Image (cartoon, helix red, strand yellow):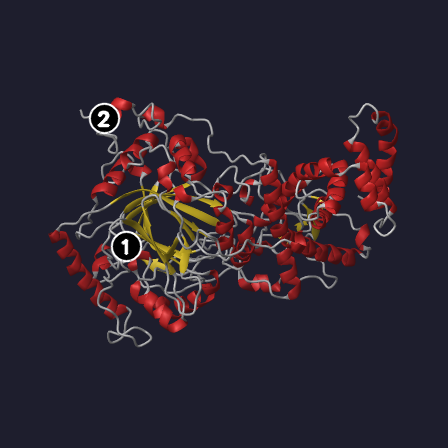
């Protein structure tokens, strides 16, 4: 057996120099499951940590203020209800285990602190729903479900509809408790502003009163906010620019054209190569990221060990350990097929799925099957099942200060204490078939959707699916049948709903690079509303479940039922003037997408993508908007889940920032006097010492700060004396003076300056 059979990238000469085990790329089952020590953890200097913390404080403080203001309003309402002054209101701490996530029982979003709980049952209501209920604008949760009946396999390729059974699939259904919008509209606040527990039809008991509770300890938030405000002033962050300058010296050499919008300055995306990224590139990244622009980083695999991501290697690593149900999604009828029910069958086993990844699979009509294996193994188990691949992925991540799933300083998702329930941000593995030909129906796509956080996707492996001339001819024949079916069911007189002629085929795609593995269309946050308007207007022209035309739309992006082909993108630009950034992703490219940017993907080859989410300070507003939007979705909507809990992340991130910026009272005094000497050069305690030691002699300090015009407070005079003593306390001659005077002077300074 040739030694390179399982190591396609290695020659026999490479084996002679060093075997795969010595290179840390051995793909035997034992080595693939071998846990290795963490080598990619971010380690920051004290100076960098302070610098980054100041940036975070500047970014986070407005949102913490806003969160606190919302809680104060609810506390004021509680004071009004009880007839007490605001200071006399005591709020009970709820019994909520720290390793569990508390959700509102009405809108199902997470609760970070203040909420109302029933005195008779476990019903919890967030203060946003409380406000909406009092304002009379609480949204109804349910809606009538839409059912899709299976029209038969033949229908997928243009045949007459022949239902195979009475089985239906519903996009949305009423909740099991039979709740109705009428019951919700009858639920109203009491005249004094208090709120009774809702009726049983909505999930409550209808008997108790909702009492104000809190998750965090009393005064935890107010004390933290007060400390944040003090440090904000101490570091003069009001004068600090919120974002780095947009222009950076590397941008002209690291950009790619991704759109052709008229009168726009964002048609080019920041796209550096991984090997060219230096420390100064972080500010360039922050400048573009602050504008909500995607960032593309190429050649990220060049810095890894070179571990194999071949499908059969992945299958061997996981095979014996997977005990959970595994499903594949068929992109033609958008139905899932379970693998575990026939795990050892030849038709749908994990090994046969990976075999089809390489060789391709045709259905009974000789149409290429596009199957997707999403988030398998489950994201929480990815590192357990594939520890070596997990480390390989982490080592490939660009801008680890943001993207590292455990230790990135700018990632709010890692700021929670270790004993708290962490948000599920990945890493996640996505394996899907792909085809360079645009099939028009059944393409391997991820339909338009949002992410609840920022996400980076790295293309770790791809494989081209080759089709013979006879297979291509059969595909063209089936496309003709698809077109005739569309003419009959969707279009009137061969025209689209807006009067434009429907193109017979959608074969013309953006210019594709033969090396490309996936085609990304990413829309600007500001264009999301217009995109939704277009999709609502034309939703009947799209197919989804069982390849049937859509019957309704709730939210065009959250529904995940739309993919815009070339023609629809052209019409979108003509009707609403918006155009996505279009990016061809090659092997080893990392695509970073900001939260709140709608996007869609089409696989041009079979692809293995790995992603991980992160919550950057620049995207907090988009994450909060995402949370607000899912609040109003129907209860059984596929996107109706707040997995992130961004408010909780925000609060704990602020607490860590304050801990990292916190200095002792004596250090604050020395920083204070050093700022007087060099106002623009002091950022850290270390810098204060460097400035004071060569300059702060007793004579210099007395000359500069004890003359009447310069001595603004009595406290300053004591600071001068105290700092002088600190600097010379090591001198044997002066040490007795220091010991006698330092403590009393220090106490006086604290009182006079209120530090």
**Residue plotted at (28% across, 23% down):** 17
Q: Position of residue 142 (x, y in %)?
A: 50, 60
At a point 24% along the width and 51% down the height, the residue shown is 514
The residue lying at 85 percent from left, 48 percent from top is: 711
Secondary structure beneath dot 1 equals loop
Q: Is residue 329 above or below residue 562?
A: above
Q: Is residue 160 above or below residue 690?
A: below
The quarter holding residue 239 reads: bottom right
Give the labeled residue for mark 1: 443
Q: CA distance from mark 2 to mark 1?
A: 41 Å
Figure quadrant of the C terminus = top right
Q: Which residue position is annotated with label 2? A: 13
Residue 453 seen from this side: no
Mark in the foreground, 2 or 1: 2
Front-most of residues 728 and 471 = 728
Asked if residue 735 lies left or right of residue 597, the reply is right
Callout 2 environment at 10 Å: few (<14), some (14 to 19), or many (20+)?
few
Q: Is residue 353 above or below residue 638?
A: above
Q: Rate crowding at label 1 as few (under 14), some (14 to 19) or many (20 or more) other CA atoms within 10 Å.
A: many
| Quarter of the rendering containing residue 360 | top left
Residue 29: horizontal and vertical position, in percent? 32, 26
Seen from this angle, which residue lies furthest left?
Answer: 470
* Residue 708 drawn at (x, y percent): 88, 50
| The one of 687 and 626 positioned closer to us in this rendering | 687
Disc tally is 2
> Do we see residue 106 in this rendering?
yes
Is 265 left or right of 341, judged from the image as shown?
Answer: right
The percent coordinates of residue 24 (x first, y second) are: 35, 27
Q: Would you say 280 lies left or right of 344 here?
A: right
Q: Which image quarter is the N terminus in?
A: top left
């Amino acid at each position: 057996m040739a030694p390179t059979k399982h190591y396609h990238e290695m020659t026999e000469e490479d084996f002679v120099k060093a075997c795969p085990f010595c290179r840390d790329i051995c793909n035997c089952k034992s080595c693939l499951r071998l846990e290795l020590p963490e080598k990619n953890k971010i380690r920051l200097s004290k100076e960098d940590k302070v610098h980054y913390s100041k940036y975070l404080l500047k970014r986070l403080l407005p949102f913490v203020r806003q969160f606190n203001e919302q809680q104060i309003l609810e506390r004021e309402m509680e004071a009004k209800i009880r007839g007490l002054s605001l200071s006399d209101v005591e709020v009970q701490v709820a019994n909520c285990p720290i390793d569990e996530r508390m959700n509102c029982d009405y809108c199902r979003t997470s609760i970070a602190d203040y909420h109302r709980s029933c005195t008779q049952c476990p019903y919890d209501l967030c203060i946003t729903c409380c406000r909406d209920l009092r304002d009379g604008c609480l949204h109804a949760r349910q809606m009538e479900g839409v059912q899709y009946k299976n029209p038969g396999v033949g229908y997928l390729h243009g045949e007459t509809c022949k239902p195979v059974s009475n089985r239906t699939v519903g996009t949305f259904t009423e909740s099991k408790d039979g709740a109705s919008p009428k019951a919700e509209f009858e639920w109203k606040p009491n005249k004094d502003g208090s709120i009774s527990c809702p009726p049983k039809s909505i999930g409550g008991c209808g008997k108790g009163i909702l009492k104000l509770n809190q998750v965090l300890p009393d005064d935890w938030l107010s004390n933290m906010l007060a400390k944040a405000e003090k440090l904000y002033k101490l570091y003069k962050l009001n004068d600090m620019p919120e974002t780095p300058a947009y222009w950076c010296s590397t941008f002209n050499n690291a950009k790619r054209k991704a759109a052709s919008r008229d009168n726009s300055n964002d048609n080019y995306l920041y796209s550096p190569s991984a090997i060219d990224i230096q420390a100064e590139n972080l500010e360039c990244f922050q400048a573009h990221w602050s504008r909500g622009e995607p960032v593309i980083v190429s050649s990220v695999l060049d810095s890894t060990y070179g571990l194999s991501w071949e499908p059969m290697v992945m299958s061997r690593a996981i095979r014996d350990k997977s005990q959970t149900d595994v499903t594949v999604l068929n992109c033609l009828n958008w139905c899932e097929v379970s693998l575990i029910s026939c795990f050892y069958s030849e038709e749908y086993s994990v090994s046969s799925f990976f075999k089809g990844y390489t060789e391709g699979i045709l259905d009974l009509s000789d149409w290429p099957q596009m199957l997707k294996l999403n988030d398998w193994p489950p994201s929480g188990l990815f590192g357990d099942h594939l520890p070596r691949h997990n480390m390989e992925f982490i080592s490939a991540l660009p801008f680890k200060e943001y993207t590292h799933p455990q230790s990135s300083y700018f990632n709010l998702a890692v700021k929670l204490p270790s004993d708290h329930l962490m948000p599920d941000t990945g890493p996640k593995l996505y394996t899907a078939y792909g085809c360079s030909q645009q099939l028009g129906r059944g393409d391997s796509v991820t339909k338009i959707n949002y992410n609840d956080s920022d996400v980076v996707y790295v293309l770790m492996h791809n494989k081209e699916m080759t089709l013979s001339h006879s297979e291509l001819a059969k595909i063209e024949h089936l496309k003709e049948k698809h077109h005739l079916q569309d003419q009959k069911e969707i279009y009137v007189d061969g025209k689209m709903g807006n009067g434009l002629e429907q193109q017979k085929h959608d074969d013309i795609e953006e210019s594709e690079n033969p090396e490309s593995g996936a085609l990304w269309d990413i829309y600007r946050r500001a264009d999301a509303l217009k995109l939704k308007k277009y999709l609502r207007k034309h939703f009947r022209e799209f197919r989804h479940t069982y390849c049937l035309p859509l019957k309704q739309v709730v939210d065009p992006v959250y529904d995940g039922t739309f993919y815009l082909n070339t023609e629809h993108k052209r019409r979108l630009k003509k009707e609403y003037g918006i155009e996505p950034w279009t990016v061809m992703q090659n092997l080893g490219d990392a695509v970073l997408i900001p939260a709140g940017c709608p996007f869609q993907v089409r696989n041009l080859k079979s692809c293995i993508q790995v992603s991980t989410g992160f919550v950057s300070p620049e995207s907090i507003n988009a994450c909060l908007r995402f949370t607000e939007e899912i609040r109003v979705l129907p209860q059984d909507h596929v996107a109706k889940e707040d997995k992130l809990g961004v408010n909780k992340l925000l609060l704990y991130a602020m607490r860590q920032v304050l801990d990292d910026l916190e200095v002792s009272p004596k250090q604050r005094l020395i920083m204070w006097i050093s700022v007087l000497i060099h106002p623009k050069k002091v950022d850290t305690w270390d810098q204060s010492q460097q400035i004071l030691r060569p300059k702060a002699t007793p004579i210099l300090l007395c000359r500069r700060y004890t003359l009447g015009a310069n001595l603004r407070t009595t406290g300053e005079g004591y600071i001068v004396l105290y700092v002088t003593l600190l600097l010379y306390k090591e001198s044997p001659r002066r040490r007795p003076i220091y010991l006698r005077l330092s403590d009393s002077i220090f106490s006086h300074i604290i009182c006079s300056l209120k530090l």
